[in-house]
Image (tube, rainbow, N blue to C red):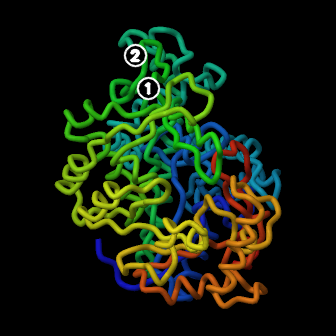
Amino acid sequence: MRFPRSSGVLLHPTSLPGRFGIGDLGPQAHEFVDFLAETGQRWWQMLPLGPTGGMNSPYQSHSSFAGNPLLISPEGLVAEGVLAAADLKLMGRGSRTKVDFATVAREKNELLRLACAAVPPDDSRFQQFEAANASWLDDYALFMAIKGATNDKAWFQWERGLVSRQAKALDQWREKLAAEVHYHKFVQYVFAFQMENLRAYCLNHQVNMIGDIPIFVAHDSADVWARPDLFFLDAKGQTTVQAGVPPDLFSRTGQLWGNPLYNWEVHEEEGFAWWIDRIGALLKWVDLIRIDHFRGLEAYWEVPGKAKTAAKGRWVQSPGVAFFKALEQRFLDLPLIAEDLGVITPEVEALREQFGLPGMRILQFGFSLSASEEKHLPHRFVPHCVVYTGTHDNDTSRGWLHSKNVHTTQSAEEIQGERRYALRYAQSDGKEFHWDLIRLAMESVANVAIIPMQDLLGLDSSARMNVPGVARGEARDVGRQLHL
C-alpha cells in the first residue's frame, strides 16, 4: 500500500481512562477518536484485540478470530438497552491506576451474563452473527465452555476424546454445556457490534485504525485445538517444536515464546485459507494490519519442544513468496505493515520489497553503535516506511534516556554511549527528549509517523507497556493523564 503523509498514536484500548478498572471500546474510546481528529492525526494503532490467555498477554490469545471480552463497554451495554444503568454498580471495584485483570474479568463476566439473559437466543441480529461466523465461533465457544467446566485446564489436558476431537465426545459436551456455549457466542456478538461501531466512528472522523496480528498463536487456543494438523504437535497435542528468537540485546539465551510452529506444508496445500480467513476477520474491525515478526514468514527460529531456552535452535524456511501471492489474490494492495525488526537478512528485505510492504523504523534503535541499526536513523529512511519513537516493546523515550533499570545485554558504557549519541543527533539538552524524538519522526521522509501515547505525555519507565522475554507486567492507565 502507498500512504499519504500522515501521523497517528499508538495506544491499546486497555490503557484508556475509564470508570471500570480498564479502558474499553466505550465513550472514552470515542472521545480519544475526537482528540485524534482535532489534532490532525489520521491513525490509531492498537495491540492485538483477541481474548488474552496466559499472563493476560494479547500475544497469547485463546483465539485468532475472537475479540477480548475485557474491552466490551458496560456503558455501551446500557446504551444498547440490554442493561440498566443501575447494573453498572457491579463494576469498578478494582484499581483505578492500573489494570487488575482478575477483578475486571470477574466483574465484567457478571455484567455480561446479565446482558446475555436479557437477549433472547432467537434475536435476529444475534442469529445472523452466529451464522456468519460459524466457521470459527462454534469451536471457540465450545472451547471456552469446556475450559470453564474443567477449571481452566489447557485443551491438551482434557479427556482423550476431546483432545482428539472425537465426534461423540464433542456432541456430549456441546449438549452438556449448551448454555455456556451460547453465552460465549453472545459475548463475541456484543464485542463485534461495539468494535464495528467504533470503527465507523473513526472513519466518520477520518481516522484509520491499525490492528496487529501476532505471527504465532497460543498453544492453548481454539485455533490449535480445532486444527491441530496445521501445527507441529504429537499425538497428545504437545508441541514437538516451538517458536522463539535467538539470543539478542534483550536476552543472552534468546526469547523462548513457546508457541507451536506452523506445518506450512498443510497450509500451502489449502491455499493458506486459514491465514486468509484470519486476516479477513481482523479487517472487519481495522483498516491496516501490522504483521508481527514479519521475518518469520521468510524463515523462523525453530526450538526443540522440550527446550528451556531459545539459545539452541535453527532457522527454517517459510513459504514466504507463495504465502504473500495467495494473500494478494484475496486482498487488494495487501493492507499490511511489516514488523521487520530483529535479525533481518537480505532475503527478508527482498520479500518485503517484492510485495511492496512498508517496514518499520524505530528511532531508539538507530542510536545503537552498531552499523546494522543505522537504517533506523532519519537520514537513512525511505519514504515508504512507518517511523516510531518506540514500540510497545520499548521503554518510553524518557525512560530510555534516563532509566537505570535497563533490560538489555549491553554494557553500561555502551548504553551511555548510545544516550550521548542520541542527544547529539537530536540536538537535545535532554529536558524534553521525548519531544525532540517526536520532532525527528515528524520531520523525517517517512510517509507515516506513529507516536506511542507514553511519549506524547512524556512519561518515564513506570509507564512502559512490555519488556520482551519477561513474563509479567501490567497495563497502566496512561490515557487518564490526557484529561479526556
Q: Quadrant of residue 23?
A: bottom right
Residue drawn where x is 40% and y is 37% of the image: 137
Is 2 located above or below residue 426 in the figure? above
Identify the amino acid type marked 1.
Answer: Trp
Question: Mark 1 or mark 2, which is nearer the start of the sequence?
Answer: 2
Q: Which residue is mark 1?
A: 225
Residue sitting nearer the eye, 394 or 108: 394
Residue sitting nearer the eye, 50 or 403: 403
Marks 2 and 1 in Cβ contact (< 8 Å)? yes
Q: Quadrant of residue 19?
A: bottom right
Q: Which residue is mark 2?
A: 165
- The percent coordinates of residue 158 (x first, y second) are 54, 15
Identify the amino acid type marked 2.
Answer: Arg
Residue drawn where x is 42% and y is 44% of the image: 65
Left or right relative to 224: residue 99: right
Is 46 located above or below residue 481 in the figure? above
Left or right relative to 405: residue 291: left
Question: Which corner quadrant holds the C terminus?
Answer: bottom right
Q: Residue furthest left?
A: 329
Question: Which corner quadrant holds the N terminus?
Answer: bottom left
Inspect this view and state whether residue 413 appears.
Answer: yes
Q: CA distance from mark 2 to mark 1?
A: 8 Å
Is 230 located above or below residue 444 in the figure? above
